[in-house]
Structure formats: structure tokens, C-alpha cells
Image (cartoon, grey):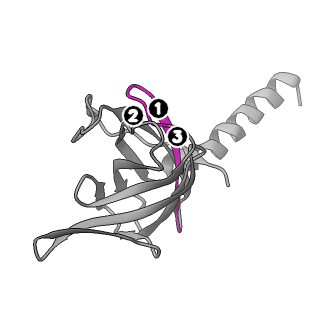
Amino acid sequence: MSRMQIIVIGSALLAFAAAPALAEGIEVTGAWSRATVRGASVGVGYMTIDNETGATDTFTGAASDRADRAEIHESREQDGVMTMRAVPKGVEIKAGKRLELKPGGYHVMLIGLKSALLPGETVHVTLHFAKAGDVGADLQVEGFGAQGPANPPAATKPAAKEKR
């Protein structure tokens, strides 16, 4: 086998091996966060997660190097009072369905921030899924009190799959 054939075959194998990362079908769009004041110990992450895998999967948690830990939380109004609770078992996302993490609902809580989240920054988070594995997302930090991303995505695109 010639050197050129080896290079072509090797390149094809690498491309094939990388394909499942994009074909996993977990798509994350519109990832954002709010700025925090200096000294704040918690931050938040919002995004839209589409499950196009063809099978139900569970969003089980998250991690970020900007916080000691990250948890899935849910805010909801109950008897006229807003409550928030951790969701340690995760959130099931049926095949072909969407999970929206947004103010007043599900969100990623960044606990034990190592530094303030400043407007214009990007904060990387790794999302954990029971079947799809780890998927990376970059939270665009918006201003204090923001209710959504300043520049929402025009189109859905696959998120990068991360190795464990």
C-alpha cells in the first residue's frame, strides 16, 4: 500500500470516527447566562436542548471549570410563591422533543463560582446525558437582569460532543 493510500484511508477512518459526535443528535442552542456581582457564589445557565437521537435520553447534570459544581434546578410558582429545587435524577427528554432551560423553569445552577460572570464573557459547561454522554456548550454571559440571549441563534446546529 502506498503512503498516499494510507493517508487517504487514515483520513477517512478519522472522519468516520468523528461522525458520531455530530450524529448523536443532542443539539444545544441559545446557551446564555446572566452576569453576577463580584463575590457572588452562584450563577445560572440557560439553553435549549433538542433530542434528535431517535431515543429518549436523560439530561443528568453538568460541570464547569468556573464553579465547584453544577446542578440541574427547577424554579416554579406554587401557591403564589416561587420555589426552586434541585433535580438530582435529571430531566428526561423524549426522542424528537425539546427541553428549554429558561428563567422561571429548568436551569443549570453554577454553585461555588470561582469568579464573577462578566458581560461579554463565555463560560464553558459540559452537559451530561445518560446515553449521549458529555456535550459541551458555551454560555454567553449577558448583562444583569437579562431575560434571554442578546443574539439568539438563527439556526440550530449540533453541539460538540466531549470525551469523558
Compared to residue 40, the image places residue 93 above or below, namely below
Q: CA distance from mark 3 to mark 2?
A: 9 Å
Ranked by sequence position, the earlier of labels 3 and 2 is: 3
Q: Which residue is mark 2?
A: 140
Q: Residues within 10 Å of mark 3 (few under 14, many from 20)?
A: some
Compared to residue 162, the image places residue 152 above or below, namely above
x and y, in percent, of residue 87 in the image: 41, 72
Would you say the residues marked 1 and 3 are in contact, meaning their CB atoms lie under 8 Å apart? yes
Q: CA distance from mark 2 to mark 1?
A: 5 Å
- Name the disc covering residue 102, or none: none
Inspect the image, locate mark 2, and give the three-letter code of the amino acid beneath it.
Gln
Q: Which residues are magenta?
A: 116-130
Would you say the residues marked 3 and 2 are in contact, meaning their CB atoms lie under 8 Å apart? no
Q: Which residue is mark 3?
A: 124
Would you say the residues marked 2 and 1 are in contact, meaning their CB atoms lie under 8 Å apart? yes
x and y, in percent, of residue 108 in the image: 41, 56
Q: Residues within 10 Å of mark 2 (few under 14, many from 20)?
A: many
Residue in the image at 45% along x and 28% along y: 121
Residue in the image at 38% along x and 70% along y: 91
x and y, in percent, of residue 3 in the image: 87, 24
Relative depth, front residue between 85 and 96: 85
Which secondary structure, mark 3? strand
Which secondary structure, mark 2? strand
- Name the disc covering residue 122, or none: 1
> In the visual, does 77 lie left or right of 122?
left
Ranked by sequence position, the earlier of labels 2 and 1 is: 1
Residue furthest toward the left?
Answer: 80
